[in-house]
Image (spheres, rainbow, N blue to C red):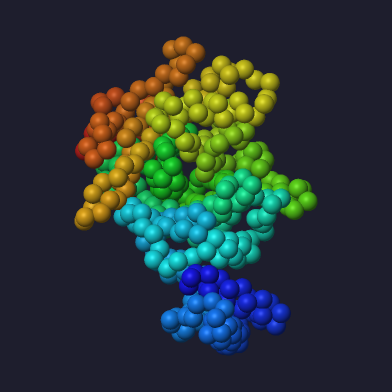
Amino acid sequence: MTTTAYEQIRQAAVSTVEDLRLDPARDYEEVRRVVSTAVDDYQRRAHLGHGRALADVGHMVDRVVSAITDYGPFTDLFARSDIEEIFIEGSRVSYIDGSGRLKGVTEPTTEEENRHIVNRLLGETDRHLDTANPIVQARVLDGSARLTAVIPPVADTLSATIRRYALRRQTLAGLVDLGSLTPGAAGFLWALMQTNASTLLSGPPGAGKTSLLSALVAAAPPNHCIRAVEEVRELFVPIVHGSYYEARPPSLDRSGEIALRDLVKVVMAMRPDRIVVGEVRGAEAFELTRAANAGCGFACTVHANSARDALNAIVNAAMMAGENVAEPVVRKVFSTTIDVVIHLDRDAVPRQGATGLRRQVTEILAVVPAMGEDFTTEPLFVRPGLGEPLQWTGAVPPSATVTMIERTLPDDMSLREILEGRRLPPL
């Protein structure tokens, strides 16, 4: 079988390249000569009855050379700007393009080859994928993508996802153009970001949470100090005052780990106006209660099925810290410090004979002073269903939030005018 022949030739060529200590990036011609020799050797054995002869020798040479000096079947995928996500499941490779279509690569691959590509990507980082570390996340491709990979015994086969950051430098105006927001909703979020209000973004994976968070960070005033912390960096908005910080996994000897919770603790001591957490999943949520009590605003994302569920999700995450604090206390802190919850969703829609993804904001809730032990919220914008208009409900945030926002607006502009869409700030 051609795939088997390819793997035999690739392994033989890689072994020779390593023995000769060739650098694939600099010794291209020498690597090509080694591959051609390996192909010729295979053909001779095949003609002697030890295998099936190749139909296209030149194609095999090009394919193996690309695998050694570049990224093989992934080379074209990495070069395309419209690829949003690449999936590897054993020997199968598929991807989602910018329109949301799921497609499979036409060139056959093997699991061993795909593992080799994953290891090459990780070679640019300080992270490793082996039996001692069967799960890894890392920034790859010069920081333009996030790799998440899992190998046996945790997974049945190599299972990896490479998420590109092509959509992460978004603006509120751009989201209006895409139909994710209305001008009034975008204007309200812009006005909110001129303050130190705290914002929670929620939705399922792939709903556009990071893109919206990126747009919110971009809308913040340049004199605001923003400290952004992430497990694996996905935000790339230029920050005038502040910086980005990335967690670090333990080294091979299990030392040197810097958790997301540690980063939140550190940046609290760096006088931030707003702490941005790319994704809240665990104990770092408890540190946000400390930040809130210190008068620091925050913005973060969480996986949830609705805006209301997002509030419960962040409380549950904070309880994972294992601190000796009762849940009602944590709930009370978040109910008095989270100002707005924004929920996004996605669905598949027909596009030019294929299926694409639609991502839209479906709810914007204001968190109002609690009337009991649970959260009390007021819907500000609602979308009855994906594809339908995002409508202002006529409600306004609590008076304290209105006062805070209107202090930052021009004297001749009011928050109500923005909510109604009659007058808009520069998005």
> In front: 1, or 241?
1
Residue 289, placed above or below residue 21: above
Residue 257, placed above or below residue 412: below
Residue at 47 percent across and 27 percent down: it is 311
> Would you identify the image quadrant in which residue 272 lies?
top right
User: Among all residues in the image, which is located at the extreme front?
Assistant: 49
Question: How many numbered callouts?
Answer: 0
Residue at 61 percent across and 73 percent down: it is 11
Left/right placement of residue 70 relative to residue 55 reads right
Task: From the top left corner, tell me how far across and down residue 334 is, in percent.
Answer: 52, 25
User: Among all residues in the image, which is located at the extreme top?
Assistant: 372
> In front: 36, or 123?
36
Left/right placement of residue 16 relative to residue 363 reads right
Task: From the top left corner, tell me how far across and down residue 227 is, in percent.
Answer: 56, 45
> In front: 178, or 161?
161
Residue 208, placed above or below residue 364: below
Any part of residue 366 in sight: yes
Left/right placement of residue 343 relative to residue 196 reads left
Task: From the top left corner, tell me how far across and down residue 51 is, in percent.
Answer: 54, 77
Residue at 57 percent across and 22 percent down: it is 330
Any part of residue 288 in sight: no
Task: From the top left corner, tell me how far across and down residue 169 is, in percent.
Answer: 42, 55
Residue at 31 percent across and 28 percent down: it is 380
